[in-house]
Amino acid sequence: MKFRIFRSAEDQTGSGPVDPTETPRMGGQLLPEATATSKAKATEEPRAYEASDLPGPTVVDSPPVGPIKIAARDVSVFYEGKQALYDVSLDIPDKTVTALIGPSGCGKSTFLRTMNRMNDTISGAKVTGRIAMDGEDINDRSIDPVLLRARVGMVFQRPNPFPKSIYENVAYGPKIHGLVSAKSEMDGVVESALKRAGLWDEVADRLQSSAMGLSGGQQQRLVIARAIAVNPEVILMDEPCSALDPIATARIEELIDELRERFCIVIVTHSMAQAARVSQRTAFFHMGRLVETGDTEDIFQNPRERRTLDYITGRFG
Amino acid sequence: MIWIYLLFLVALGAAAFLGGRELARRRAVGAKPHSRPGQHGAYALIWVAAPALLVLILLSVFATPLERQLTAAGTPEAVAALEPFRRDAFFADAHRVGRGEPALQIWERPLAEQLPVEARRMVSIERTLQWGGGLGAILAALIGGLFAFSQIKPQTRARNRVEGWVYGALFVCSAIAVLTTLGIIASLAFDSLRFFQKVPVFEFLFGTQWSPQIAIRADQVGSTGAFGAVPLFAGTLLIMLIAMCVAAPIGLLSAIYLSEYAGRTTRAVIKPLLEILAGVPTVVYGFFAALTVGPILRVFFNEIGLFLIGGPLDGLGQYLALVQNQMALTAGAVMGIMLIPFVSSLSDDILNAVPQSLRDGSFAMGATKSETVKRVLLPAALPGIAGALLLAVSRAIGETMIVTMAAGLAANLTFNPLDTVTTVTVQIVTLLTGDQEFNSAKTLSAFGLGLTLFLATLVLNIVAHRIVQTYREQYD
């Protein structure tokens, strides 16, 4: 089924009965199923969720199809002794977009950063549990985080190109990892990375001008090009569109859809519409715990957990 | 005497404040006042204090000339007939007698009788002025206060008027700083002009001979003096270069360590220590240079020289064996040590201003810390660091004490760091200390040097601040 998130004005004014199999409605509207339940519970006191009354790792989630790229088991993260993530176990399939959703401070970005060991750069951060990439524990002492990060690229919330030329930005990774030796080879790498990031046509004639002169959306695509220039296996994206306008967002989303064919992509997003549009798998985090995970369609249409339903229907978060 | 007036004025001010506030409260009854009673009180206080202060300032400026005028007006004939300097001496004695002290001189007949009379007249003039001034101040305060009280109405915008006075007072304070600077520049420029009337600018800027001694008798050797400042500029430049060779790399690397590598606890220890180093008075660095570093370097080079004598490098050995304590290297090296905290603390700030997102971006690409520093942070921070180094250069040029104590006084035109050299600042010190004749080219040359130095550091500072500024705006 094709996923439609925003209904047209016609749909909204239409008085016909709502088809229960219809796309869930976003933007504060309630899901069809949710309407019934929320009416029934309208008299109930609204209550805050406490970490203590949350269950542990949830019931059987629907397993992903296809080969697993990253398998996380009982991953906990502590910042200066304060626990930010509780026993997260999650399988991330290859050549798929997995979306991590949840309210602010729920631990989704923290979990994302465990996968390329970026938490190592924060003093006082401690990660426990096992994260296996292709069956290999990435927290093992034999794994060099520097080399790991060449295999697991990352795109941040705000575009962060280096204050260098566009060319230098893309060439940065190949240069420090010594992937290419000749200048002509580097030109090829830069060109293909920019092409795959959908930026080549816009910057081909000004590769030597500063990356700071690009628009926000272009900068974010440049950062994606920079990440794919080293041919990573996984790309982590931490709210990549939160600083962009809708048009730039749409371009990045298209790009993510294209990149899915070659990379394993994990994306943290605050926009449930975005999660629904770009991802095939979704994991919902709340208060540092993984609440529910499954195929995106299932999560949005038939969430098994009450909290998931409340979140995707906009009742909290 | 004046304290009594001041005390009285303070009391008057306090009364004005309290009275104004109370009056404003009463008059506000039934109306919707624009300002709060306290603001009316403050307004009244200002109108009491400002006119009184104005009168007191005028009095302190004009009291002396006024007193002189009054004294001269009633001078008895016998005194008026005296020569000017004897007349001044007589009045000075009259003052002393008036204060109850014995006269310094013994005055002859007609004057001796006049002395107590005049003394009494002096005292009365002084009294009159003091009372007059004090009463004037109080009168001004009262008039101001009455005016302010007449203004206390519900619709008066006392709040805004007080704000206006605050603005004015703050403006005057900052204007004083700026005007003082302008005054310094003007006095430098004025005296330099007098110097350049005696010595042509061209000769000063491009002459290679510096010997400001001017003989007392015309037939003495070296009677003309030479004012070519090039050896001084060269010495300043040499010492500055040596200092920067020490300060730039060590300061920069320690800044990189502090901002990128050091843990929180290490940083908490090292940063204050560096700042203590920055607070050491330069005289202390001067001791250190003259008494510790200088002898160590001399012994070191002398030993090398003794070792080389008789060998193939005999000439060099002869030279090194005779190296003195005072040399450019000592002063430069110690000055460099002095500048390390300056450079490192500025560079540390600049590196910290580079957004964390750039570091994250680089780490996420699989770059190590040193690769990130070398390829991302330093290029990004380069303009700011260049600005910091320029600021350090301008401090090195203006530094006086270390060079005075450790570099020597001989104005040699050399770039040999083992030679004694002298700098612009050292020459200014030697030219102006002790008894000096303020009209000779020798003394005036200090102002020429001062002006040159001032212009050089001014340009450096402006350039450096401009660079640092544009760099800061880059990320905002």
Image (tube, coloured by chain):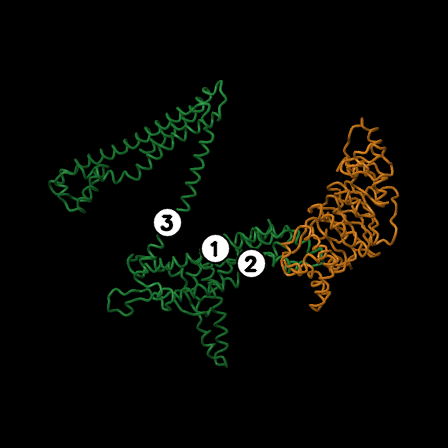
Chain colours: A orange, B green
* Residue placed most toward the observer, B28 or B222: B28
User: Dot 2: what SS?
Assistant: helix
SS at badge 1: helix
What residue do we see at 80% from left, 44% from top? Answer: A276
Name the front one of labels 2 and 3.
3
Labels 2 and 3 positioned on one and the same chain = yes
Q: Left of B75 or right of it: where is B157? A: right
Please state the horizontal and vertical placement of residue B272, each as a whole percent of the image.
56, 50
Residue B34: numbered disc: none
Q: CA distance from mark 2 to mark 1?
A: 19 Å
Crowding at dot 3, Cα within 10 Å, few <14 / some 14-19 / many 20+, comes out as few
Residue B461's mark? 1
The answer to which of A61 and B450 lies nearer the viewer is A61
Quick check: B385 left or right of A69?
left
Res. B64 image quadrant: top left
Left or right: A151, with B460 as reference point: right
Which numbered tag is attached to residue B251?
2
Which chain is home to disc 2?
A: B
Q: On what subunit does the disc labeled 1 rest? A: B
The Cα–Cα distance between marks 2 and 3, rounded to whole angstroms, is 36 Å
The residue that disc 3 covers is B183
Three-letter code for the amino acid on which mark 2 is drawn: Gly
